[in-house]
């Protein structure tokens, strides 16, 4: 290559180019504030900012509705353990969604007056042929279906001094100050704070610094928006969104070319060299201009031009052509944000198409503007959430003379059509407004002092309280039990109605009377409704001609009940009350129970020795003793006396029933002979102890009952309706002994009937209930024995074993036993194991709840209902049930 060619430098190629000539000024500017105005005015509704200064509001005459009918919410259900488990928010949204379908204007009213909170749901309709009362019925049905357990009352217009209907309006009419809350409520995603988004704060009241409470009413009026209108709003938003999208991002491309020529005195092979230089130069220029992507274009342009101009003809001129292409991207943040907000509004409307969309007016009425400012401020804290920025919460304290209060008291939304309209809309919309009174781009629903919102947002706006407040109860009933009890024959006993989450259903809970032969346990605390349940069962059993025996250790409920049945229905009750000869002026029969006399049906033989052995066990368990030898001596005395009195019949096993029997006092003269051989140092002590205990059984009311030669006719006691009341017997040990003797006699009597009466035996073999015994305060008889503490044994265990065996065997003889007690854990375990039906009323002790929940096969959430049961309610489970049932028990028929 010649030196002359090497002398041509890179800079020489562009020395004639003026870089200023190829600069392109940016003529594109960010648009004016159109998107900012669109955001604030159309979507964030900034035109509401000045509403508080409006002088006067004109009532909306476009829609006419009937009179509002009201329901008062009296009680709300919650889960016994965890309030969140009931999911009150979603259930309430279900109510609102159902009401939206029917197209009824819905009114939510929370009134706080005189320290009490009243919660009302109102409804009115403009639907042809549907009255407000019909709409109210549907509202009640929707609420009960979606929120099982809620209790509501129809607020009747009965024109009395207690007319709650009039009180609603009287309270509202006393208020002259009014405010409004607009904006889109939204939930807080932080669960720890979401619990604050309920109306608990307002329901609890607002207390002033002087201790007095502010009276106020929160009134939420919700007009359902039909689906075709929702669809129209969505379409308008989409159209507007499409226009916005055009301006979100724009690209501008500019092209410019420059040509220059200069003599350089080249020749030879310079063309090939310059062709390569041109490629490099193009890349570098692209780099200088800050647009490296232009390099390839520049390279091809420069290289081609140079290569074509310089050849092997040794011309002395160089021609350079230069071109440039520049693309600029412009992003409008206002338009981008407007597009984003529009999409979120469309998503809200889509939810509205699913569950309902409403035009919602949220108004507060009070005595003073300070009341309004305080309550609306609290509402803002409740309504503000993660997405409230879509339309911020605004608080409006309106002028008292603006007619706003009168409009709201008529349960109408406040329209923004008034003389202030010119201040709110641009000139371009005024002509359209004059034609159809629609000036908002999304339609007339946005022309009220209200907020269009979906059902989820309305549910938050009217979020129900979750805590007990004066005037509104929360009951722990939000637990599901079985709702389909077994279908039994017509002869079955209806004992109550099935309850679902605290609401009494129409389906009855029935039991087969013959299933009571497999025994029942009725338990519950004082006043929980045990006696009501028992009497309802007894009424049905007695009405079927089945004899009953009620052993009542305390009170006199069953005495009164039996006397009433005897007087009104002629049921031949035998009533015994040892220690009393009359009751309420009515003479009573005298009860006698000879401990030596076995019970049997007429003509049946008896086992005298077995009776004496069981008697010894009962006496040892019932008589206080600290000497180890006394139980042995008692056994010796009873055995010796019986053997001497009955002679050979005592050992026969099947003796003809004697007519007379030893008395308890007959044992005392035998004591000296029995203890004569003992050590003189112990003789007096043992003799005195034994005589004292035997005399104890012959004195007072217990003596008149036990120290007799013959018992009351057992056919009357165990074959006819009978009540034995032991309330006049003082000691619990005495009651236990008498009850034990009666139960032992009952057991013997049933075995006797089964053995000697063929018809009885046949029916018993078919598992018929032939007799029912009910034992009140059963712990006196069936106490769970304590641990053995000394070598004398445990007499309570002996009695427990005796009656455990009796309980498991006696049902085979047609006898059903219903055991009633307040504390199930103090009963012997077999009471729970060997009873078919369990009727569990309210229990509060954790150990009692645990034991009964296990016996009922309850889930953990169901177990928590036991201490929350109301009076007269019970959880019931029997062998015909698939699962435990919650029952509202019937009251006994008079």
Image (cartoon, helix red, strand yellow):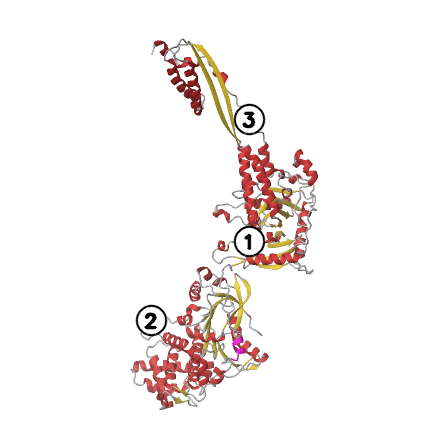
Picture disc at residue 67:
none
Q: Position of residue 505 (x, y in %)?
A: 55, 64
Dot 3 surroundings within 10 Å: few (below 14), some, or many (20 or more)?
few
Dot 2 surroundings within 10 Å: few (below 14), some, or many (20 or more)?
few
Closer to viewer: mark 3 or mark 1:
3
Please report the residue visible at 52 percent of the width from the left and 46 percent of the height from the top: 187
Q: Quadrant of the C terminus?
A: bottom right
Magenta part, dominant SS: helix
Residue highlighted by disc 3: 29
Picture disc at residue 94:
1
Please report the residue visible at 55 percent of the width from the left and 26 percent of the height from the top: 29
Q: Give me the C-alpha separation between circle 3 and circle 1.
A: 51 Å
Q: Earlier in the sequence, mark 2 or mark 3?
A: 3
The answer to whether residue 870 is visible is: no
Disc 1 is placed on an element classified as helix
Q: Position of residue 232 (x, y in %)?
A: 61, 43
Magenta residue span: 539-545
Picture disc at residue 789:
2
Q: Quick check: marks 2 and 3 in contact, CB under 8 Å?
A: no
The answer to whether residue 614 is visible is: yes
Vertical relation: 503 (above or below) 301? below
């Amino acid at each position: 290559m010649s030196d002359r060619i090497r002398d041509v430098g890179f800079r020489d190629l562009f020395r004639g180019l003026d870089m200023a000539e190829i600069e392109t000024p940016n003529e594109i500017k960010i648009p004016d504030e159109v998107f900012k105005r669109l955001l604030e005015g159309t979507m964030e509704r900034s035109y509401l900012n000045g509403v508080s200064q409006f002088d006067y509001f004109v009532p909306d005459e476009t829609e006419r509705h009937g009179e509002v009918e009201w329901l008062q919410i009296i009680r709300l259900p919650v889960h016994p353990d965890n309030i969140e488990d009931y999911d009150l928010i979603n259930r309430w949204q279900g109510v609102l969604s159902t009401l939206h379908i029917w197209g009824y204007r819905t009114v939510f009213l929370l009134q706080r007056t005189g320290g009490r909170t009243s919660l009302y749901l109102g409804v009115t309709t403009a639907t042809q042929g549907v009255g407000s009362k019909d709409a109210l019925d549907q509202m009640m049905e929707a609420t009960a279906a979606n929120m099982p357990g809620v209790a509501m009352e129809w607020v009747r217009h009965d024109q009395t001094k207690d007319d709650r209907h009039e009180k609603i309006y009287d309270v509202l009419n006393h208020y002259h100050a009014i405010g409004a809350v607009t904006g889109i409520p939204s939930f807080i995603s932080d669960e720890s704070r979401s619990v604050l988004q309920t109306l608990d704060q307002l329901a609890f009241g607002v207390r002033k610094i002087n201790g007095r409470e502010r009276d106020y009413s929160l009134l939420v009026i919700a007009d359902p928006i039909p689906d075709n209108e929702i669809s129209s709003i969505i379409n308008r938003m989409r159209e507007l969104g499409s226009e916005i999208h055009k301006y979100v991002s724009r690209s501008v491309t500019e092209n410019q070319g420059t040509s220059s020529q200069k003599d350089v005195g080249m020749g030879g092979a310079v063309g090939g060299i310059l062709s390569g230089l041109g490629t490099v130069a193009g890349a570098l220029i692209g780099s200088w201009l800050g647009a490296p992507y232009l390099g390839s274009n520049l390279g091809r342009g420069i290289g081609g031009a140079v290569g074509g101009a310089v050849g092997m003809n040794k011309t002395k001129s160089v021609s350079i052509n230069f071109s440039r292409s520049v693309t600029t991207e412009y992003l409008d943040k206002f338009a981008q944000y407007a597009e984003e907000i529009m999409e979120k509004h469309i998503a809200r409307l889509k939810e509205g198409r699913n569950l309902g969309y409403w035009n919602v007016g949220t108004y507060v009425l009070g005595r003073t503007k300070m009341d309004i400012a305080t309550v609306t401020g609290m509402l803002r804290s409740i309504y503000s959430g993660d997405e409230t920025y879509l339309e911020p919460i605004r608080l409006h304290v309106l002028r008292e003379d603006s007619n706003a209060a009168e409009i709201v008291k008529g349960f109408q939304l406040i329209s923004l059509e008034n003389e202030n309209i010119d201040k709110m809309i641009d000139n371009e919309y005024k002509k359209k407004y004059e034609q159809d009174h629609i000036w908002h781009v999304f339609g007339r629903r946005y022309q009220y002092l209200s907020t269009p919102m979906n059902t989820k947002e309305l549910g938050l706006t009217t979020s129900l309280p979750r805590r007990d407040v004066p005037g509104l109860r929360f009951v722990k009933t939000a637990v599901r039990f079985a709702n389909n009890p077994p279908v039994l024959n017509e002869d079955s006993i209806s004992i109550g109605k099935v309850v679902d989450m605290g609401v009494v259903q129409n389906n009855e809970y029935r039991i087969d009377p013959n299933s009571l032969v497999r025994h029942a346990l009725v338990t519950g605390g004082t006043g929980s409704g045990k006696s009501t349940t028992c009497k309802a069962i007894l009424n049905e059993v007695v009405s079927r001609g089945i004899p009953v025996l009620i052993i009542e250790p305390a009170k006199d409920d069953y005495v009164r009940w039996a006397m009433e049945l005897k007087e009104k229905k002629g049921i031949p009750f035998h009533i015994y009350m040892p220690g009393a000869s009359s009751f309420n002026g009515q003479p009573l029969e005298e009860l006698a129970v000879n401990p030596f006399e076995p019970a049997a049906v007429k003509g049946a033989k008896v086992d005298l020795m077995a009776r004496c052995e069981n008697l010894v066990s009962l006496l040892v368990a019932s008589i206080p003793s600290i000497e180890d030898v006394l139980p042995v001596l008692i056994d010796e005395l009873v055995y010796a006396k019986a053997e001497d009195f009955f002679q050979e019949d005592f050992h026969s096993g099947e003796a003809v029933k004697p007519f007379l029997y030893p008395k308890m006092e007959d044992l005392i003269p035998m004591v000296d002979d029995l203890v004569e051989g003992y050590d003189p140092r112990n003789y007096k002590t043992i003799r005195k102890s034994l005589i004292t205990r035997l005399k104890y059984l012959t004195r007072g009311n217990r003596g008149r009952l036990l120290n007799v030669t013959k018992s009351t006719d057992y056919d009357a006691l165990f074959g006819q309706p009978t009540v034995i009341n032991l309330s006049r017997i003082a000691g619990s040990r005495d009651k236990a002994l008498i009850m034990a003797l009666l139960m032992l006699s009952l057991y013997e009597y049933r075995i006797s009937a089964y053995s000697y009466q063929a018809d009885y035996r046949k029916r018993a073999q078919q598992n018929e209930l032939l007799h029912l015994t009910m034992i009140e305060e059963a712990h006196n008889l069936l106490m769970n024995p304590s641990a053995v503490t000394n070598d004398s044994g445990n007499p309570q265990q002996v009695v427990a074993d005796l009656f455990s065996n009796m309980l498991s065997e006696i049902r085979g003889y047609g006898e059903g036993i219903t055991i009633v007690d307040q504390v199930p854990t103090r009963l012997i375990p077999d009471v729970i194991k060997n009873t078919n039906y369990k009727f569990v009323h309210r229990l509060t002790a954790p150990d009692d709840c645990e034991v009964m929940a296990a016996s009922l096969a309850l889930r953990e959430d169901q177990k928590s209902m036991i201490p929350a049961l109301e009076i007269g309610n019970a959880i019931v489970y029997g062998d015909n049930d698939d699962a435990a049932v919650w029952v509202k028990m019937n009251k006994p028929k008079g």
